[in-house]
Image (cartoon, rainbow, N blue to C red):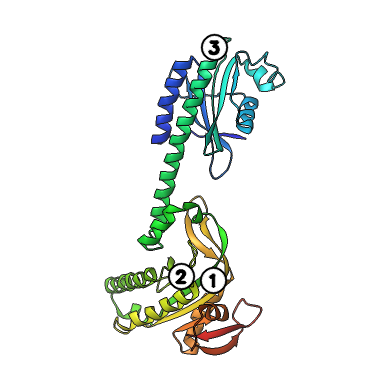
Amino acid sequence: MIHITSHLSDLEALQEILMDHLLELVGAERGFLMLVDPEGGALEFCTARNFSKESLFESEFQVSRSIIFETFRSREAVLTSNAQDDERFQSAISVQELGLRAVMCVPVVVQDEAIGVLYVDNRLRLGAFETDDLEFMKTFADQAGASIHRTRLTRERNRLAQLFSRYVSPEVVGELLARPHDALSAQRRRVTVMFVDLRGFSALSEQLPPAELLDMLNEYYEGMLEVLFAHRGTILSFLGDGLLAVFGAPLAMEHQELKAIQCARNLIQWGESRQGLRFGVGMATGEAVVGDLGGSQRRDYTVVGDPVNTAARLEKLTKSKGVAVLVDEETYRSSGLTGGTNLGAELLAGKSNPVCIWAV
């Protein structure tokens, strides 16, 4: 299926200028550039122009789907002086209905991947195009493809930098930009999830004026981020008086369980140095889905899965157990630490089997 989009950006404006030159140089009546939507996978019209340098998006237009899809599928350029009498396209209803004469169509290929199709036609004049025109159009398609690829990479890098600067340290952002495909795509991976809660926040919120309360929270979060980033943790969301973080995403991390426990201990120490702030921390390790998730109106990098639920339950359990940091068996065992306290198995809310808990 082919979709039509009329949204213009700097790239599309440049494509229109180039298309106008192409139509003039090869003597075409109309010209179209179609690109594969990176998310939906369908061909979309990005540029639609006529010889008068007018956009065709404001009017109804049709092209030969048979020629377009055959060119995209085969990656072979098409040149025909009279499509209606060409045995390759005589059976194509669109060719006959549109009264197509001279047609050229070439694939747009980048790094051995077909990303679109460039198409021009002349419905009035037989033999409007020659072999030299086709070769010129192939060169044009190669240059257009390279420009599109560079622009998309730049946009993707900018999107990554903007998105992940909220979640990870600048050093990790730099690593992500070197391999962007590892970052946004939703995937299953082993992660260590951390929930942190500021103890006594409800009482503080009643005692402090709103401005002072916000200042305290901002200082609290700023310090938390410094500790998390120092241990290569990824902050996913602030939860009023707490936060959700993950280790092992968006990039894989060696010894993530150990680093997560060390991070939790340093958070406790940092809190004690700030007028005795007290925290409760719950952590769990396992497979979860991580990625840029959400709808068209709002998307966030997040984590979904059993470790998230377990970590949240363990954080709440720190209050009744009277300890600062609780982790599940998988986190403790994989960390390689010794000296933790085994608090036995607990049946946590939402779990069908008891979870072995360690205080670290």
Q: Earlier in the sequence, mark 2 or mark 1?
A: 2
Q: Earlier in the sequence, mark 3 or mark 2?
A: 3
The Cα–Cα distance between marks 3 and 2, rounded to whole angstroms, is 64 Å
Q: Quadrant of residue 98?
A: top right
Q: Amino acid at mark 3?
A: Ala
The Cα–Cα distance between marks 1 and 3, rounded to whole angstroms, is 64 Å
Q: Answer yes or no: do the residues labelled 3 and 2 have beta carbons within 8 Å?
A: no
The Cα–Cα distance between marks 2 and 1, rounded to whole angstroms, is 9 Å
**Mark 1 or 3, closer to the camera:** 3
How many numbered marks are there? 3
Q: Answer yes or no: do the residues labelled 2 and 1 have beta carbons within 8 Å?
A: yes
Q: Residues within 10 Å of mark 1 (few under 14, many from 20)?
A: many
Q: Earlier in the sequence, mark 1 or mark 3?
A: 3
| Side (left or right) of 23 relative to 309 | left
**Would you say residue 58 is visible in this rendering?**
no
Q: Amino acid at mark 2?
A: Leu
Q: On the rendered image, what quadrant is the N terminus found in? A: top right
* Residue 238: percent from left, percent from top: 41, 68
In the image, residue 258 sits, relative to residue 12, either above or below, namely: below
Would you name the residue on which mark 3 appears?
128
Would you name the residue on which mark 2 appears?
244
Would you name the residue on which mark 1 appears?
308
Mark 3: secondary structure: loop
Tell which of 208 and 72 is nearer to you. Answer: 72
At horizontal 54% and vertical 40% (from top left) the residue drawn is 37
Mark 2: secondary structure: strand
Q: Amino acid at mark 1?
A: Val
In the image, residue 227 sits, relative to residue 86, either above or below, namely: below
* Residue 346: percent from left, percent from top: 59, 85
* Residue 166: percent from left, percent from top: 39, 60
